[in-house]
Image (cartoon, rainbow, N blue to C red):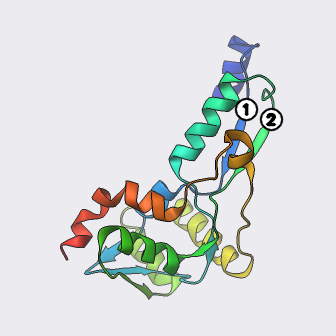
Amino acid sequence: MTPNLLTHLAYPDAQVIHLHSLICAAHAFPLLRICKSQLWGPYANSVQVLIHEADIAAVAVIALTQDGHKGKAYPLTGPEALTRIEQLNMIGAAIGKKLRFQEIPADVFQKEMEKSMPLPVIKLLLDYWSETLTVPEVVLPTVEQLTGHKARTLAQWAKDHASDFSPLART
């Protein structure tokens, strides 16, 4: 039995709510190789709609504390569709440094990442970026509909996490 099924059997009245976000901003950038103010990676012009983890948390609080959400599934996105280059530019603006995206082939990226990440995860990322190169992600209004405020921008996320990138500011 899966842990979710066991939990449901143990607590049959528990609320089950699904929050779906393809990729959280906080998970997008630690995966990238940044060296000497350059980000090395594939699919520079792929377009994603990254979500701030605080927006996921805000939706979760509402879904778990207010009536009417049991059994619902909520797809979550940030408020803007951005290329990976635009995403990097926002981090650069937050730390006051010009960062450059150096595009490399997917197979080169895969070989480098295999040193620190399981191959299935790498392939999932490469497929995701490749897909969003031809079919960009779409902004959804779910965060605003549930919380009453617009989802936080990636620029806001970058400001909130500027200290995470402080080594870049010194290179």
Q: Identity of the amino acid at label 2? A: Lys
Q: Identity of the amino acid at label 1? A: Ile
Left or right, residue 131 beside residue 30: right
**Disc 2: which residue:** 72
Q: Secondary structure at mark 2?
A: loop
Query: 106 or 103: which is nearer to us?
Result: 103
Query: In the picture, which quadrant includes the N terminus?
Result: top right
Q: Is residue 25 above or below residue 134?
A: above
Q: Secondary structure at mark 1?
A: loop
Choose top left, top right, bottom left or bottom right for residue 65.
Answer: top right
**Disc 1: which residue:** 17
Give percent across and percent down for residue 164: 31, 57
> Which residue is farthest front?
148
Q: Is residue 19 above or below residue 166?
A: above
Residue shown at the point (24%, 64%) measured from the top left: 166
Query: 117 or 31: which is nearer to us?
Result: 31
Q: How many marks on residues?
A: 2
Query: 94 or 104: which is nearer to us?
Result: 94
Task: Note whether residue 117 is visible.
Answer: no
Tag 1–tag 2 contact (CB < 8 Å): yes
Choose top left, top right, bottom left or bottom right for residue 159.
Answer: bottom left
Left or right, residue 27 beside residue 37: right
Q: Is residue 106 above or below residue 8?
A: below
Sequence-first tag of 1 and 2? 1
Give percent across and percent down for residue 52: 53, 52
Give percent across and percent down for residue 32: 41, 69
> Which residue is farthest left?
170
